[in-house]
Amino acid sequence: MEVNKKMFAPRRHCLIIFLLLSSCARTIHSFHLAPPPSYLSKKNSANLFSQKITTSIDTNDISSVSDGKQINSGSDTQQAQSRPLGSQELLMLPRQYSLTPDEFPPMTHTSLAVLSKTPPLPILRSAIQKALDTHPLLRSRIVGDGEPTERIDLFQMVRADTPQPESFVACDDISPDDILRSSTVSSTGDFEKEWKDKFSFALDHGPGREDPALWRLELIKTADEKECALLFQFNHAISDQSSANLLLDQILKSLSKQDEFKPAPQAMPRSLEESILKKNRGVSSFTPNTAQYVAGKAGEGFKSPIILPDSFSGQDKSNSLADAVTTISGKAAGGKAELNDGPPGCAGRQSTVVFRKIANVDALVQKCRDEGVSLTNVLSAAVSLAASEFVGGEELKERNYKVLQSLDMRRFQEDEEGGGDRCNSVGCHAGSMDLMYGPIPDKSASTSSSSSLLWKLAKEGKTQTEKFITNGGPEEAVRVFDFAMEISDMNNLVHLTAVSQSSLGRAYSAGITNNGVYERQLAVKEESEGTGDRQLLESQHEPYQILNLFYATSHARTGCLFQ
């Protein structure tokens, strides 16, 4: 095997340099993290942590899919219904690390729609069957152990070849009975509490590769069937919120039209890496832009953004460079956090979800236009100021903040003919970028100058976002992460960070997502449409109307301090 070791030696050197820089920045595993909730408007009110359903407002948001181009699946539906998982999908599944007894839990994406009418279970089962027939990933299982032939470095982190890569394989034996659950509450007063509790619980207990399917759907209803909600629970490897919206719209249309609705079967969607990078992958594809991107990530780490409140003693002892060296040597920085009951590898941490409302979305959007920023820009600034209220101790300080801002990576791909993904089918193409704010004084949200600071930060966020996109940041983020996942056991590094006493899995001060306007996204293709344009999503398919829509991904294991 000496020849193989020589062949992989350049890989090993590149990996160590890369991990040192990226671990300092605390972002290596997080560019992809997809979102907890955006907002939804109902007349003049909205939920801050839900999705907007209206066509009357243009947020000019880069995070939503709204290009309106003609999308045709054509002969692509004849492609093989299997493929290896991409790097982002391997992180979210996640790929396991055989040299540790710890089991890495799946990353969960949860979406819930409150509906105006309760669908009969037989018709809902039929709608789920149509969804299974339409979308290959909804009926896929994982095949392959993902183990390398050997690990060729001192710390057992650098991978050689993978003879049996973990792969999606679409199966015909997954049925609605594997997907559907139903629960009933006795009264209207219990209904809201029930779906909120189930939503929160679902975030930390998602489907993994050993479950019958990689997604679930639960119908939550009152005994008199006057109120109901559909709770979707996905392994994040097969979904993002655009996909969840696509699926929700299809199911509601199936419930409404029943046998008249005939969605066109879709091909297995390409991975994010294949769609953006195509075959231009690996260290040989690195350019000066790549080096600039990695250097920028390292520079963020040297700004020491706040990731834990002062009340956590481990934060005072944390040193980003020392922590990076400890992590790549296969140990948890600061030692392992005390393990309590809870999801494996999370040190007992559970998601805490708070549902809030924006009083007047239209007024907020108009103010954003007046200030020349997007809604996402102002929400990114708002979560930073909100975090400043609780990170400090008795001694008030000024701190730097690192904010995870979600991006829909389909925006940065070529059209479908060029290999890009246009959300024809369910899949995960979520991404993100890092915003650096500060220094921000503690408790800035409660000062008299909070409003002016909010809009100042929003404009800074807009400038950083535009620079990131102009300099090819989305492509470089995918390229660097893909390279790291290919040659290393990144999932073990994520796990070591998750149980680290120094960071408790925190990589960001705060995070935000805004999936944009629901009814500007394209719906699933119908057989009757032929080569014509796809229709748009609708918030109402008689007699079913979406009254509210919420979504989130779990950050309990690793991610943002405040999302």
Image (tube, helix red, strand yellow):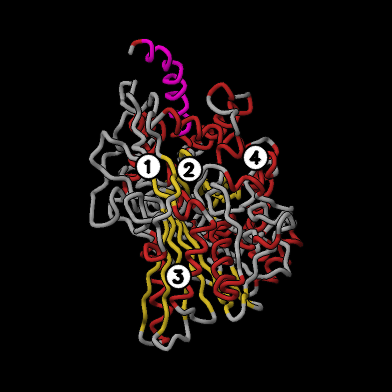
Disc on res. 419: 4
Q: Above or below — where is 86 with respect to 113?
A: above
Q: Main secondary structure of the magenta part?
A: helix
SS state under label 4: loop
Residue drawn at point x = 38 percent, y = 39 percent: 491
Q: Amino acid at mark 2?
A: Ser
- In which image quadrant can residue 476 be found? top right
Q: CA distance from mark 3 to mark 1?
A: 26 Å
Magenta stretch in the rendered image:
3-22
Q: CA distance from mark 2 to mark 3?
A: 25 Å
Residue 106 is left or right of residue 304, and the answer is left
Disc on res. 125: 3
How many residues crowd mark 1 within 10 Å: few (<14), some (14–19), many (20+)? Answer: some
Residue 252 image offset from top left, x and y in percent? 56, 71
Q: Label 2 belongs to which residue?
A: 82
Q: Amino acid at mark 4?
A: Gly
SS state under label 3: helix
Disc on res. 143: 1
Asked if the residues shown at circle 2 and circle 1 are in contact, with their CB atoms under 8 angstroms apart, the answer is yes
